[in-house]
Amino acid sequence: MYIRKVNYKEEFIAYLQIEKQYASHTITAYRSDLEQFFIYINAVYGELQLAEISHSIIRSWIVSLMNDELTARSVNRKISTLKSYYHYLIRNKH
């Protein structure tokens, strides 16, 4: 299992599908980006609560993406996904 608060991820995906009515390809990309982020966090830092994920941890993920030679466009999309996810969590007091 991923980070303990993984249910928030599925709530977020449902929000994008139902309320935002994002296209299926966009939903797939968001889900994939979040999965990659949580896999990285668990592999490098172990199981954390969402509140324990600091900006330095997020930065380390971004550095790892760049080290994997992803295009700037792909990295920026992943950053955008993560920002949207955290904004959703804040708006919904998670």
Image (cartoon, rainbow, N blue to C red):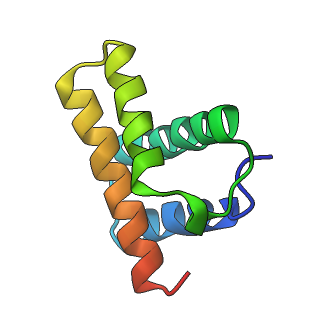
**Is residue 56 toward the left or the right of residue 44 in the image?**
left
Q: Residue extending furthest front?
A: 56
Q: Quadrant of residue 17?
A: bottom left
Question: Can the viewer see residue 59?
Answer: yes
Q: Residue at x 28, y 32 (%)?
A: 75
**Is residue 76 toward the left or the right of residue 89 in the image?**
left
Where is residue 81 shown, x and y percent of the image?
35, 51
Q: Residue extending furthest right?
A: 1
Q: Residue at x 43, y 36 (%)?
A: 60
The quarter of the rendered structure image containing the C terminus is bottom right
**Is residue 9 toward the left or the right of residue 65 in the image?**
right
Is 23 situated above or below 40?
below
Q: Quadrant of residue 19?
A: bottom left
Where is residue 70 shown, x and y percent of the image?
30, 18
Question: Can the viewer see residue 24?
Answer: no
Q: Residue at x 68, y 65 (%)?
A: 5
Where is residue 36 shown, x and y percent of the image?
53, 35
